[in-house]
Image (cartoon, rainbow, N blue to C red):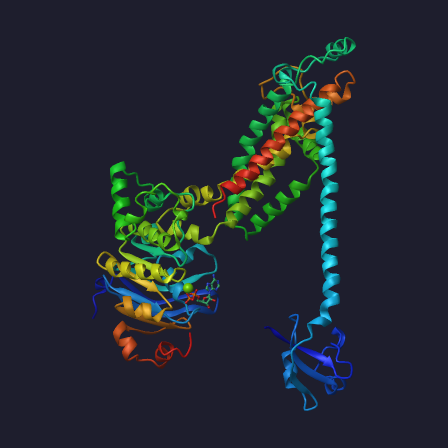
Amino acid sequence: MRHTLEVLNQDTSQPCDRSQRYNPTDRKVTTQQIVMLRPGRSQRYDPTGRNATTQQVVTLRPGKPQRYDSSRNSRRIKDRLFFYLVCCCTFLTLIPLFLILWELIQKGYRQFNLGLFTQVAPTSMEAMLARISGDALPGGILNGITGTLLILFVAILAAIPLGIWVGIYLAEKGERPLARLVRNLADLLQGIPSIVTGIIVYIWVVRPMGGYSALAGSVALAVMMLPMVIRSTEESLKMLPASLKEAGLSLGGSYASVMLRVLLPSAFSGLFTGSLIAISRVMGETAPLLVTALGAAAINWDLSRPTSSVSLLIWEFYNDPNLAPLVWSSSLLLLLIILCINLSAKSIATKWKTQ
Amino acid sequence: MEDTVKYILELKNVSVSYSPGKQAVDNVSAGIQPHTVTAIMGPSGCGKSTLLRAVNRLHELYRDIRTTGEILLKGESVFRMNPMQVRRLAGMVFQRPNPFPTMSVYGNVLAGYKLNNISLSQAEKDGIVERSLRSVNLWDEVKDSLNKKGTFLSGGQQQRLCIARTLALKPELLLMDEPTSALDPISTARIEELILELKKQVTILIVTHNMSQAARISDQSMFMYLGELVEFGPTKQMFTKPRDKRTEDYLTGAFG
Ligand SMILES: Nc1ncnc2c1ncn2[C@@H]1O[C@H](COP(=O)(O)OP(=O)(O)O)[C@@H](O)[C@H]1O
Ligand SMILES: [Mg+2]
């Protein structure tokens, strides 16, 4: 059994409150005190209390547990209340999530057909004719899907290798002033509103190139992905035990080969998850693409020309009452893809975790 | 006059400091003869690991660590050799077993070759893996699970795998930093047997704070205290009639 020293007030035999805890320099209190050793909640006590004056009596006595009963009861009630509150809040936050999903499914399922994946977006006129005759809208979002793939692919190609490179630098030379600067800049970059990034890329890329292009869209998304990839690389490399690197180097490996063959593979799950999450974050971005990739009615694989994306199409559909029904099916598709990426990122993170 | 080449490892006035003005290893000099087991003993924090890591130049990975003095490996200064060559000649086994988590048992044994970009034929690889695993008495236990991750093995098996990984490169000196402190008594006993067998192949420098372990396996012993090498001599002599009062105090359990 654990014993704790408690300082009791002699006349009342109640624990002194915190403010008048035993203090050897305070005469008034010391003469009135009994130092008792008894079971109870562990509580800090002042070891100097043992240098008590002759006026103090030290007794050893079993505690009276029943004294705590009422407080134990009220604590249980508090625990319960807290638990219900947590459940309530969780439920409340789930409601909008399910409502969104429900809304999308309910409004989008009619247009969620093969045509969505195989046809380009209809014109406003085509859609109007179909609506008048009461048919489902013709066409789909193929030009958006291919555009998203193209823009994203180039962004990934740029951001992930570069981000990993910088992440390695931060993990290895993190204390250098330059590394600190880079780390802070990366954090700052993460907080920049996406429209601002888009406008900067407009100035950097669209203007010099003389027009909107898929490439400009890729640059904007890459800039947005970069800080996430950098930080997740840095964090996952830092999680590795130092002994792993030392073991690699102790076998006579060069620094580069230890990094490439031991450290990066060991951090792979973290890198991969981080990259997937970065991809899913920028996948639905609309604002930065509006001012860089602009959008296009047809399928385009040319990096130097305006290109559509799923998110841009959603924006266009939203702005055209005739095309509005397509908003739901395209949003549903985008949501499902992002959901899949996030879920696989999670399962990879748990499955490939190396100790 | 002593012939320097008679020692496989010679330390001359080696000092290491983690921060300026504080010597974690203070002016240590000693010579290690080939095919011996030398135990480094001392209370924790006395600089055993620090001394061991100075030998294969691991301290260079960290800023602020300063190593002074001279360390001769087979008569040649390690500071004038290529660090990668030093580390291949002087293999290291760490306190906690640390097989590479992404590699199989097979891959772990060959990791040294892979990291040094040495390409081997399949037959050579198989040969090295079997020979190395046999030399640590692990072959029979893992020969059916060579493709499993090294981290699936038990702690003692992992540590033997790490020793095999180091031996695969045929080092001449084996630096072991409390290799059994994270293991159970049975695994510890197996590793101790192994060390006695390995003496034929390599010279072993082993850090231990287990005195009976030092007595069982070592030929020579060093006793360090507060960074200083207090006593260095044959183990038997050190345990029966230590020259220094501090060694005696340590061996009789006065501190540590
Ligand atoms: N990375 C480090 N940074 C600063 N001081 C260290 C570091 N590692 C060890 N030391 C100090 O160096 C001294 C020797 O440590 P170490 O060689 O690990 O001791 P041992 O292995 O004998 O227990 C200790 O005082 C320890 O505090
Ligand atoms: Mg140590």
- Residue A268 seen in this snapshot: yes
Question: Residue A208's image quarter?
Answer: top right
- Residue A292 seen in this snapshot: no
In this view, the residue farthest toward the bottom is: A54
* Residue drawn at x 78%, y 84% as measured from the top left: A11
* Left or right position of A203 against A131: left
Q: Where in the figure is residue B158, as x and y percent of width and height?
A: 37, 52
* Left or right position of A251 against B66: left
User: Could you tell me which quadrant the N terminus of chain B lies in?
Assistant: bottom left
* Residue drawn at x 39%, y 54% as measured from the top left: B155
**Figure check: A237 above or below B248:** above
* Left or right position of A95 against B201: right
Count every numbered label the image shows and give the total.
0
Q: Where in the figure is residue A300, as x and y percent of width and height?
A: 60, 17
Question: Residue A339's image quarter?
Answer: top right
- Of residue A292 and residue B109, the one placed in the foreground of this image is B109
Locate ligand 1 by image quadrant: bottom left
User: Could you tell me which quadrant the C terminus of chain B lies in?
Assistant: bottom left
* Left or right position of B194 against A152: left
In this view, the residue farthest toward the front is: A66
Q: Where in the figure is residue A122, as x and y percent of width and height?
A: 70, 13
**Figure check: A278 above or below A205:** below
- Of residue A16 and residue A170, the one placed in the foreground of this image is A16
**Figure check: A8 above or below A263:** below
Q: Where in the figure is residue B189, as x and y percent of width and height?
A: 31, 62
* Residue drawn at x 71%, y 35% as measured from the top left: A97
**Figure check: A30 above or below A333:** below
